[in-house]
Amino acid sequence: MPRGTATEAADPAVAASPARSGHGLWSGRFGHAWQLIAFGILLVVIWQALYSFEIISHFVLPAPWPTARALGTELKSLFTGGYVSHALFRTLEEVILGFLAASAVGILLGIVVGETRFGERVLMPYLIIVNTMPRVALAPVFVAWLGFGLSPKILLSALIAVFPVIINTALGMLSASRNELLMFTSIEASRIQTIRLLKFPTAVPHIFAGLKSAITLCVTGAIVAEFLGGGADGIGELINSASEQLDVATVFGYIILLSVIGLTLYGLLVWGERRTVHWRDTSVTQRTR
Amino acid sequence: MSEAADAGAARSHAAAQVVVDHVAHRYAEVTALAEVSFTVERGTFASIIGPSGCGKSTLLHIVGGLMRPSAGGVTIAGEVVRKPPTGTGYMFQSSTLLAWRTVIENVVLPIEIRHGRAAARAAQARARELLRSAMLQDFEKAYPRELSGGMAQRAAICRMLVSDPGVLLLDEPFGALDEITRESMNEELQRVCLATGATALMVTHSIPEAVFLSDQVIVMSDRPGRITEIIDIGLPRPRTFEVTTADPRFAEYVNHVRAALAPRTAARA
């Protein structure tokens, strides 16, 4: 299959094979709980030491305890319907809408790239150009186009996240074996039938690998867009104003909050993957229990 | 629609016969097949055997309408092959079962593709019957990952048979199986052929397998692929694996095929 080469060469880093995707979180490959906790305590001790001996300036690095207190304040505001819950809702809205847009556009373009000569030879080079652009630099342009509302944030988050979805979908569409393709030819399957009943289902585990990369990129994209655009009252703006007041503990609290959000979204995707790709016999579904 | 297909299958069944007439194939500058001609009589079993790269799979793909030859032509049941013929069942080296479909959904796939979902649902009874005769009745709702290699190939046989083909084309179907499973699969395939009266053409690189199953063994030479000898196997049917050790003629046939393959090996050594 000569078609595989262009897409494979494009970005091997994001084109993580779906077999490897099981090595991430929630795969049951973590060490024992006590090892994890012990290592976590060690990290906090190192953190405290860095603070106590002032190896890093106190303006830059807060101590663990004030950070925990700041996080506590944020969580309280979050669960009592305060300003944090409002901001988090806005940011989540950007992330989720950005993710849905990136998924829909990415899967569609991935099918075109993987399935058609036009997609592979003509579309793909342009997609690579877009991917190599520093898309974050487009944030001010999006503000100029779309104003200060949610839409420029959704656009940036989708634009940053779409590429791994395209690449993984395209690779997945090309990963049906030669014998499977011959079998479909031998029973006179049409091109649409071959896509619908063979190539797309074969691509599904690959697509999930792309979606898992995309969801974390969406969080990054939304926060960066909030930094650069403003006006959406999301977590990015709260981080901005806290850091303007040199309140680094509060900033760190928000970062921890965001990573918990990121992990949760990622976990939801892993759960969805398990439900969808239940027929696979790999570590993803089997070895976890 | 499915009645028409059944009638079509029955008609091709009655006249099934494969004629390969001066077929040649070239890939760019390389001649893969040079002027190959042979005939497979209705209801008989023929094997194509030869060294790797002799174009035997290419030849089978041409017979099955998966590829067009550069020259010459193939007729099945009197009709020139231009696309995969409806009355033909195909089997490949890997089972090519779809991992996301249950065994029975896999078996009815050819019906679903050709005649739609309603026809596939109607074919489930036939599929169940085939699975029972392949001793897979308990695995109807299982997914392919739950099957052993031999069971997966038995399911692939069921899928091949679901549209009652008059001609079976087998592309090294048991090449990936262990020897013990392979022997029982050979007996299974013979049973299927005798029960259905189908005409079969198989590509293999196992000499005992070719002799055990075939009425004629077509021996091919290295590139460019051409036929060096066609050997008729006169062993009575049904054959059991005792034949391979008990009947001295079996060993003679095996040696005959080996000798027909040998000149090339001798020349190369």
Image (spheres, rainbow, N blue to C red):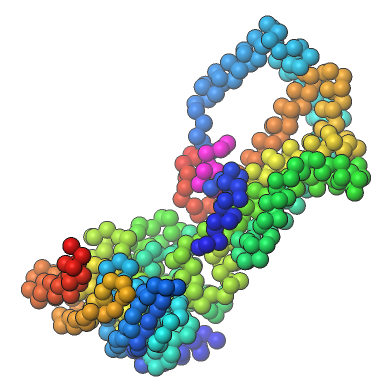
A194 to the left or right of A110: left
Residue A259 among those drawn in magenta? no
Count the labels in the image: 0
A144 to the left or right of B186: right
Q: Examine the image and state in which quarter residue A122 appears.
A: bottom right
Instruction: Give the image location of residue B134, x and y in percent.
Output: 33, 69
Please name whichever residue, A49 or B13, is drawn nearer the observer in this view of the structure. Answer: A49
Vertically, is A122 above or below B83? above
Please name whichever residue, B266 or A13, is drawn nearer the observer in this view of the structure. Answer: B266
Q: Residue at x 18, y 75 (%)?
A: B260
Vertically, is B100 above or below B253? above
What are the residue bounds of the magenta stretch? Answer: A18-26
Instruction: Give the image location of residue B161, x and y in percent.
Output: 39, 77
Residue B191, visible in the rendered structure: no
Q: Examine the image and state in which quarter residue A59 appears.
A: top right
Q: Residue at x 51, y 31 (%)?
A: A30
Vertically, is A120 above or below A288? below
- Name the quarter where the N terminus of chain B is drawn: bottom right
Please name whichever residue, A247 or B53, is drawn nearer the observer in this view of the structure. Answer: B53
Furthest residue to the top?
Answer: A53
Q: Examine the image and state in which quarter residue B77 appears.
A: bottom left
A222 to the left or right of A145: left
Vertically, is A256 above or below B47? above
Instruction: Give the image location of residue A226, x and y in percent.
Output: 84, 36
Q: Residue at x 52, y 62 (%)?
A: A2
Residue A259, visible in the rendered structure: yes
- Name the quarter where the C terminus of chain B is drawn: bottom left
Instruction: Give the image location of residue B94, x and y in percent.
Output: 39, 63
Q: Residue at x 30, y 66 (%)?
A: B52
Please name whichever residue, B80 or A19, is drawn nearer the observer in this view of the structure. Answer: B80
